[in-house]
Image (cartoon, grey):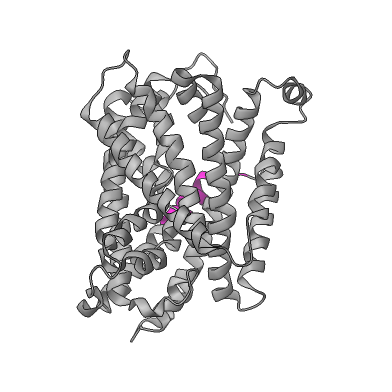
Amino acid sequence: MSTQQSSDPIQKIGLFTATIISMNCMMGAGIFGTPVQLSTMAGPAAFVSMLFVVVAVWFMAMSIARVASIVAAEGSFYAYVKSWAGHGMGLVAAGLYIFGLVIAMGGILGDIAGGYAHQLLHFGTPWGLGLALLVILTGLNLLGVMISKMVQYIIITMTVLALSATTIICLFHADINNLFPFAPHGSWGVLQAMQVFIFGLFGFESAASLFPIVQNASKNIPKALAYAISIVGLLYILFVGSIILAIPSEIFTRPDLPITEALAQVLRFGTWVLPFINIAIVSAISGVLHSMIWSSGSLTFSLLKNMKSSWIQSLVKQNVINSRTSVLIVGVPIILCHLPKPNFGLIFPFVAASIIIAYILTMGALLQSKYNKSAITYIGFLTAIIILFSAFAGIYEQTMGLF
């Protein structure tokens, strides 16, 4: 084993590798929980929602990448927002981002994982299996068990296989009659579906941190993000679109219905492949959850180190708060967010609102007079506001429905 001296130059990666890494940041478990929501909210008109979100994410990605190139500091959203709005707003932005991730992992991904695991194992309950998975993955992170690069490649491969296999099967069972009525809930349904579909694209912002290791980063990072968002967006649109074409909306009787369970009701052939799709989805979700628990713990640790509380700083110096205990700080809330009967209609907009606000605050750095502004910045800001409005509308609608 050889060791690299600190004076050695950092090995740079090219455009192709940067694009693959950017795709890995986005491609994950989120998309497996969105088709049912999209179908019930907007029907076939969800195509419009998806196209808008892909375009919006492209503009937001270009803007956040530019901020990352200007503010090269540890702390991600905290550092980006602190550069123009100060320490307090930096804490707010990073806190909202972590809050959104915690709710997403416990309230959505844990439930989805449990549902698909139950399809495979046929014992216990989906909630219990999801809880066990979250506890195990949090424990592995506490022990410092990290996913190797080879396992990461296997996970992304299985994710692509699950998406591709489901898309192909659905296209073979497509029925054009399922496209009508096209917009059963009108334009309001199209707007509402935006805050659901963007859940599958969260993660693109992680690729902005690649600036120090990419050749000619100022040109290649925006290109890598543009290519990655286009490819992943196309895969997701084909995936969700094929499901809408193959599965009548009346089959989606509950929001947490696994896609494979719905497919089993319409398949004329090929049912033998469904268990393999379940395995691929559970593997993909487990890998994404493992990485997200660690990354959110790392971001939490970075955030705590920047807090001005003397008590917290004392705990950091005493090593009571460190990278592993920060995993526990986010892991416990994640587990507590795993409810037996989650209200997806409320959780999706809460996640979208929290993370989109962090995006908006980050892009705010580009609106300062000392930076040159471009149409990309303004369009990214505007599209983010539209998606945020969609999220707030969803929160309002679901909250009013509780009373």
Where's the N terminus, which quadrant?
top right
What x and y, as percent, mark residue 363?
37, 29
Q: What's the residue at 35%, 46% (across, down)?
A: 387
- Of residues 298 and 36, the one drawn nearer to the viewer in this rendering: 36
Question: Where is residue 24 drawn, in percent x and y?
Answer: 41, 46
Identity of the residue drawn at 58% across and 73% down: 118
Q: Residue at x 20, y 77 (%)?
A: 176
Q: Quadrant of residue 5?
A: top right
- Magenta stretch contains residue 218: no
Q: The C terminus is located in which quarter?
A: bottom right
Magenta stretch holds residue 151: yes
- On screen, residue 381 versus residue 332, left or right, reads left
Q: Tell me if residue 339 can be seen.
A: yes
Q: Is residue 206 visible?
A: no
Q: Position of residue 38 (x, y in %)?
A: 36, 63
The range drawn in magenta is 146-157
Does 346 sit left or right of 178 as displayed?
A: right
Judging depth in this view, the residue of 294 and 30 nearest the camera is 30
Between 253 and 320, the one nearer to me in the picture: 253
Identify the main secondary structure in magenta: helix
Q: Estimate the x, y position of residue 242 in percent, counting from the top left.
A: 29, 69
- Where is 317 relative to 177, above or below? above
47 or 387, nearer to the observer: 387
Q: Is residue 12 above or below residue 151?
A: above
